[in-house]
Image (cartoon, rainbow, N blue to C red):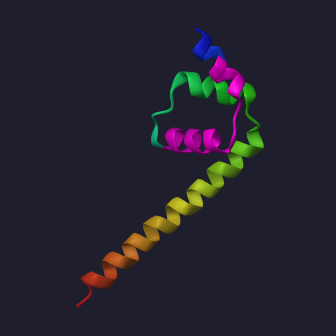
Amino acid sequence: MDEINKEKRKGTGFLNVLKSTIFAASGIQTRTNRERDFEHGKPSTFIAAGIIFVIIFILSVVGIVQLVMHYAAP
């Protein structure tokens, strides 16, 4: 019980926002972390993290496709 209270008081630092964004995008966010984010996090922080995550994800996919097409072309 004390561990749960400690986690809730911890707030949402940069690493927690990063982990929450990645876990939420992959669909494995825990209920405890989701509740912590909604109670203590700023929406603007998570929106910015989400936008940055999407941009990095898209650039990664484009880079991988370009790499595969480069080696697949005759």
Tell me the quarter of the image containing the N terminus: top right
Image coordinates for residue 37, horizontal then vertical, percent: 66, 30
Q: Residue at x 67, y 21 (%)?
A: 8
Q: Is residue 32 above or below residue 15?
A: above
When asked about the image quadrant of residue 54, the answer is bottom right
Image coordinates for residue 4, horizontal then vertical, percent: 60, 16
Q: Nearer the viewer, residue 14 or 68?
A: 14
* Horizontal relation, residue 22 to residue 11: left or right: left
Q: Residue at x 51, y 63 (%)?
A: 58
Image coordinates for residue 40, horizontal then vertical, percent: 74, 28
Image coordinates for residue 51, horizontal then vertical, percent: 64, 54
Question: As drawn, which residue projects farthest toward the bottom?
Answer: 74
When asked about the image quadrant of residue 44, the answer is top right
Q: Residue at x 58, y 38 (%)?
A: 20
Is residue 22 found inside the magenta-colored segment of the image?
yes
- The magenta region covers 6-25
